Amino acid sequence: MVAAFTFVAMMVISVSAFCSYKKAVHGDVTMKLDESTAQVNLQDSRSAVKLGQRLTVFREECRGGRFSVCTKDRVGFAQVSKIHDKKYAEVTMDKNVYFDAGYVVESEK
């Protein structure tokens, strides 16, 4: 009886934690507009991004063949300056942040 109650309690806690989980912003730089502005593809996280939100910018490098190993190096931070549509937004990089197309952006942690 105690085991069944514990199991049910754990399931309720797990479901409530899953439902309250906030989707993180994740995307990549699709186009460099100028030295401090970029267009980013936010994939499916459009609903989670807000105007003025800060994002972390990473350079991702993958090596290997079939079982590649990827590393992410943080290069700086950016701020969402314009939301275009469901998929694309414009971000403004902080001073002295070097970036290029293909770099990754994620929610600031």
Image (cartoon, grey):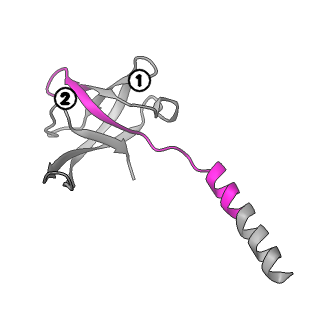
Q: Extreme top residue here?
A: 84
Number of numbered discs: 2
Above or below — where is 99 with respect to 1?
above
Amino acid bearing label 2: Ser
Q: Is residue 30 magenta?
A: yes
| Quadrant assignment for the N terminus | bottom right
Q: Which residue is mark 1?
A: 87
Q: Which residue is mark 2?
A: 36
Residues drawn in magenta: 13-38
- Secondary element type, mark 2: loop
Question: Residue 105 at what x, y percent from top left?
Answer: 31, 40
- Secondary element type, mark 1: loop
86 on left or right of 60: right
Q: Are marks 2 and 1 in contact (CB under 8 Å)?
A: no
Question: Residue 93 at what x, y percent from top left?
Answer: 24, 34
Which of 44 and 55 lies nearest the eye of the viewer?
A: 44
Q: Earlier in the sequence, mark 2 or mark 1?
A: 2
Identify the residue at image location x=38%, y=31%.
Answer: 42
Which of 87 and 68 lies nearest the eye of the viewer?
A: 68
How far apart, in angstroms, are the residues tagged by discs 2 and 1? Answer: 20 Å
Amino acid bearing label 1: Lys
Identify the residue at image location x=19%, y=38%.
Answer: 95
73 on left or right of 92: left
Q: Extreme bottom residue here?
A: 2
